[in-house]
Amino acid sequence: MSKGPSALEVMERFATVGPDFLTWLCVHSQRDDLPAPASEPGLAVRFLGPMVVAGDGGEATKATLVGDEAPASPELRTALSAGKRIMRSKVEFIAQDATWTFTLDGETFDMRSVKLPVPKVADLDEYMSLRVQALQQAAFLVDQLFDLFLPLRTDANKWAEEVKGWK
């Protein structure tokens, strides 16, 4: 009787899900065909430098692309063609009149150096409440985009076709 894959086998199989998500997000935002989350149908996603890309070789194959033109650079296309994935990048979400800018880590999904669309208000409690709401909204948008990505990533045939399109 087969029990199926062990927890370790499942973890190894999906160890690259975060970097794959970041790479998918970047590729489709560059092509301007990124599916929109239900809560923000007009969401625009823009990748900025610096971007860290790495291959299966870990540290030995890691490269950092700098500058706001890094996502459209031939160096990124070459890295993706060689099988590298985006490990970390500065990302900008633009929805209606709000802009969130942050660095997203593909391995941990940590958001760093977050710039939030919060107006200046005199009351500190209100200001902090608005910041928390804006941060929650950014995390919610990342979750919704991940939910759009996951069915593609978990279908081996569709995923193989998707990655072919990056080369």
Image (cartoon, rainbow, N blue to C red):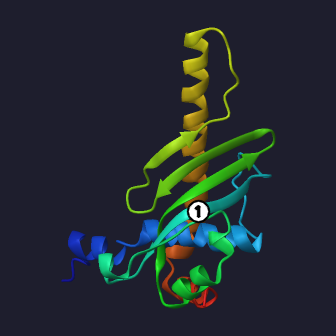
Image location (x, y in percent) of residue 117 = 68, 34
Q: Nearer the viewer, residue 143 or 79?
A: 79
Label 1: few (<14), some or many (≥20) within 10 Å?
A: some
Instruction: Give the quadrant of the C terminus.
Output: bottom right
Q: Residue at x 71, y 43 (%)?
A: 99
The outermost residue toward the top is: 123
Instruction: Give the quadrant of the N terminus.
Output: bottom left
Residue 6 can be seen in this image = no
Q: Nearer the viewer, residue 101 or 49?
A: 49
Q: Quarter-wise, where is residue 131 in the image?
A: top right
- Circle 1 is placed at which residue position? 49
Classify 23 as above or below 145.
below
Give the SS element for disc 1.
strand
Report the side of 108 relative to 28 (left or right): left
Image location (x, y in percent) of residue 67 = 62, 64
Q: Quarter-wise, where is residue 17 in the image?
A: bottom left
Q: Amino acid at mark 1?
A: Gly
Classify 37 as above or below 34.
above
Q: Residue at x 64, y 43 (%)?
A: 100
The outermost residue toward the front is: 67
Residue 97 can be seen in this image = yes
Image location (x, y in percent) of residue 66 = 56, 66
Q: How many marks?
A: 1
Q: Nearer the viewer, residue 130 or 10?
A: 130
Q: Quarter-wise, where is residue 73 in the image?
A: bottom right
Q: Nearer the viewer, residue 1 or 144?
A: 144
Report the side of 21 relative to 9 (left or right): right
Q: Residue at x 72, y 71 (%)?
A: 30
Q: Residue at x 47, y 47 (%)?
A: 111
